[in-house]
Image (cartoon, helix red, strand yellow):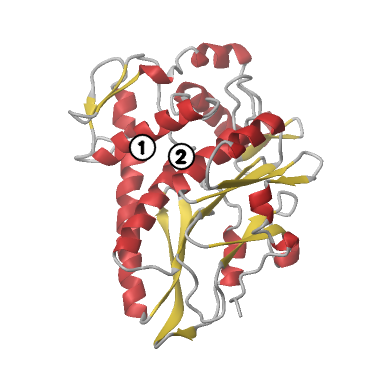
Amino acid sequence: MKRITGKLAMLLLVMLFFSGCGTVAEKEYSKFNDSFYDTFDTLTQVVGYTETEQEFQAYVEKIHSRFQELHRYYDIYNNYEGINNVKTINDNAGIQPVKVDREIIDLILFAKDWYKKTNGNTNIAMGAVLEIWHEYREAGMDDPENAELPPMKVLQEAAKHTDINKIIVDTQNNTVYLEDPRMKLNVGAIAKGYATELVAREIMAEGFTSGIISAGGNIRVLGKPLDGVRERWGIGIQNPDKLIVTDEQNLLDTVFINNASVVSSGDYQRYYIVDGKPIHHLIDPKTLMPGEYYRAVTVVAKDSGVADFLSTEAFLLPLDQSKRLVESLEDVEMIWVMPDGTVEATDGMKKIMKSHGATGAKAE
């Protein structure tokens, strides 16, 4: 959360699909958009169809306020007066349990549950290792000529303090305790997606049912576009070889969805250069080095928190294991971009991809 850390895939292209207004049934809806840049250190865009701009802005204010609250809860770098957050938990590792708000308890339980369901590559207890990588990445970005990799011995020592079972959650008293005094939580792989899902569900319950929330490219689609033309939203997927999206030709592909989330992870996000080689931020817990199986992966899932978690987990697994994981889950589809640029996709993903004939057009 210290620098711009959002998954940037699809972010620019999303706007290509946000145009026009139309009439649905007897109501007339218009398209509006707004954005803010003070949560999770990334640009969050909100686009939607409402009857009036005043109605849209009221929803945006609620979305913004909730994102601010969740940002403070999940922050690992900053303290906030009157709030115990993830940083507070880290500061009290090996000292005492910390009483926290339910949103933090639920995030940690979610992370532990999905850690057990999967191959254990996405571990919120990896903070000691990721902190070292963060420091070297920051130094390398500030002074590129002297950029270097962390010493493996230092990483291996930190890796001794990443046992997720030593995160003790007391749901009755709403406390979290890190048994290992050298353990640190890092929720960066899931916090933004988890927060986006919370906000999306809450705002839909209040009546905002046609829109998109894009938190740094972590995209959550609400309902369908009420423009009288389309039945599904079209979301562009970032081509890792073309980081500046000027038109649709620069995209990897487009997927058409409603009431779902699209999240990508890739080697083109958050990296620095060492001896001419990009060193990205997705660290494999087995090697303690950046994963090298893919250029990028994209996940489509109903839940944005699940999509965010799996985009890291799948990126850090070889293709056969990554495919088996996805195939074992319901309502999850995936695209893998291999190091040579070839693209693999699940059968369900192909059905919603433009390159395989999918569209967002209204059925006749």
* 194 with respect to 334 (left or right): left
Mark 1 and mark 2: Cα distance apart in space = 8 Å
- Does residue 142 show up? no
Left or right, 226 with respect to 338, comes to: left
Residue positioned 71% across, 49% down in the render: 240
Amino acid type at mark 2: Ile
Q: Residues within 10 Å of mark 1 (few under 14, many from 20)?
A: some
Indicate which disc, 1 or 2, sits on the residue closer to the N terminus. Answer: 1
Where's residue 201, x and y in %? Answer: 35, 56
User: At which x and y percent is residue 124?
Assistant: 44, 29
Q: Which residue is mark 2?
A: 190
List x then y, in percent, for residue 107: 36, 37
Residue 102: quarter of image = top left
Type of the residue with mark 1: Leu
Q: Which quadrant of the figure contains the N terminus? A: top left
Front residue of 70 and 141: 70
Q: Is residue 92 above or below residue 302?
A: above
For the residues bearing labels 1 and 2, Cβ distance under 8 angstroms: yes
Which residue is depicted at the point 42% across and 47% down?
Answer: 40
* Res. 107 mark: 1
What residue lies at 51% left-to-right and 16% top-to-bottom? 159
Quadrant where the C terminus sits is: bottom right
- Which of these two is toward me, 344 or 252? 344
Q: Is residue 340 visible?
A: yes
Looking at the image, which residue sits at the far front? 364
In this rendering, position of residue 311 left or right of residue 200: right
